[in-house]
Image (cartoon, grey):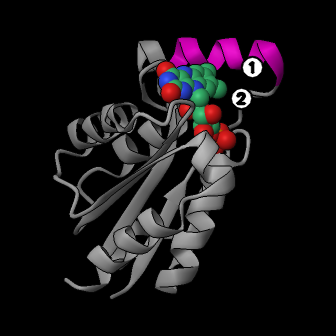
Amino acid sequence: MKTLVVYYSRSGNTKVIADEVAEALGADVEELKDTKNRQGAVGYMKSGRDAMKKTIAKLEPTTHNPADYDIVILGGAIWASTICSPTRTYAAEHKGSFKRVAFFCTSGSSDPAWATKGFDALEEVTGMKPVATLGVGQKEVMIDHEQPVADFVASLTQR
Ligand SMILES: Cc1cc2nc3c(=O)[nH]c(=O)nc-3n(C[C@H](O)[C@H](O)[C@H](O)COP(=O)(O)O)c2cc1C
């Protein structure tokens, strides 16, 4: 199964999960880079506003063609109760190129309901149901996410 992991990570949490998922699956990786500076307090506020307004970001060019993959795994953080703008943008720009999708989100809260908001947004944007989802709270990114990641990977490899 040819797999591409595509993610955006402003502060590193989503990157931790993306790298582990990609390594376990032997997947290619596309890290999204935004042309807007989202660092610091001002960047945080801009990001929250962009997410709320569902603003499309201006991403740097990507290197992999999602149409070449059996499955594309889309990942991003929850911003203002929805998927972060760069991941939303990629999903919207490549909608129609995906054969199958899976989603993962990290959130400040450990309550899985937060990640679900990101999955719902990506499902709406892509018009596709994910074959698997994974939500990880930022506390669990640091200390304890081995089993959820293993379960997510297993649910993809057992298909
Ligand atoms: C602008 C902004 C808005 C956020 N809004 C939420 C939110 O509504 N709910 C939540 O649980 N976490 C929220 N967070 C926390 C992030 O989802 C969490 O820290 C995530 O793991 C960050 O991932 P990253 O390090 O890959 O950027 C927000 C973070 C940012 C930057």
> In which of the image's four quarters is ligand 1 placed?
top right
Amino acid tagged 1:
Gly
Magenta stretch bounds: 40-50
- Please name the residue that numbered disc 2 is placed on: 36
- Please name the residue that numbered disc 1 is placed on: 43
Q: Quadrant of residue 154?
A: bottom left
Amino acid tagged 2:
Lys
Q: Is residue 42 above or below residue 134?
A: above
Question: CB under 8 Å between callouts 2 and 1?
Answer: yes
Please state if 39 lies on the left or on the right of 157 as rendered.
right
Q: Is residue 36 above or below residue 149?
A: above
Quick check: can you spot residue 90?
yes
Circle 1 residues within 10 Å: few <14, some 14–19, many ≥20: some
The image's mark for residue 81 is none
Residue at 72% x, 48% y is 12
Secondary structure under the numbered disc 2 in the rendered image: loop
